[in-house]
Amino acid sequence: MHEGKRRPDDYLHLLDQFDDGLMVLATHSWHVVETFAGPLDERQVEANLDNVKAVLEGAMDMGLEFVTLEEQVRGDRHER
């Protein structure tokens, strides 16, 4: 998504198809602010942050529960 190959809607469509179990959404923390080509400008960083926010807000709107991998493995999921 940060390289412009996918849009937040692509991820939201994937999440909408999700039925049950564990789905891992992950990103490299540095990928929001730089690529292999180098640092991104402020406008690009802001766009990347807006895209991540759109995916997370869309997932919450669908009622998906967020847990850490550690919580999932230990079975420590709580009602949120």
Image (spheres, grey):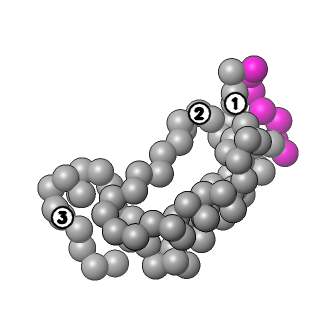
Q: In what element is the residue under mark 2?
A: helix
Horizontal side, residue 38 vs residue 58: left or right: right
Q: Which amino acid does label 3 sit on?
A: Asp
Q: Does the magenta stretch include residue 41?
A: yes
Q: Quadrant of the N terminus?
A: top right
* Label 2 with label 1: CB-CB less than 8 Å: yes
Chain-order first, disc 2 or disc 3: 2
Q: Is residue 53 visible?
A: no
Residue tagged by mark 2?
A: 30
Q: Give the range drawn in magenta.
A: 37-43
Q: Residue 52 in the image: x percent, y percent? A: 63, 55
Q: Residue 12 in the image: x percent, y percent? A: 60, 64
Query: Which residue is found at the position 68% from the left and 21% from the top?
Result: 36
Say if 35 sits above or below 23 in the image.
above
- Res 56 → quadrant: bottom right
The label on residue 34 is: 1
Say if 14 sits above or below 57 in the image.
above
The crowding category of the residue bearing disc 1, from other C-alpha atoms within 10 Å (few below 14, some 14 to 19, many at least 20), is: some
Which residue occupies the extreme top position in the image? 37
Query: Which residue is found at the position 69% from the left and 27% from the top?
Result: 35
- Res 22 → quadrant: bottom left
Horizontal side, residue 17 vs residue 33: left or right: left
The crowding category of the residue bearing disc 2, from other C-alpha atoms within 10 Å (few below 14, some 14 to 19, many at least 20), is: few
Residue tagged by mark 3?
A: 76
Say if 32 sits above or below 72 in the image.
above
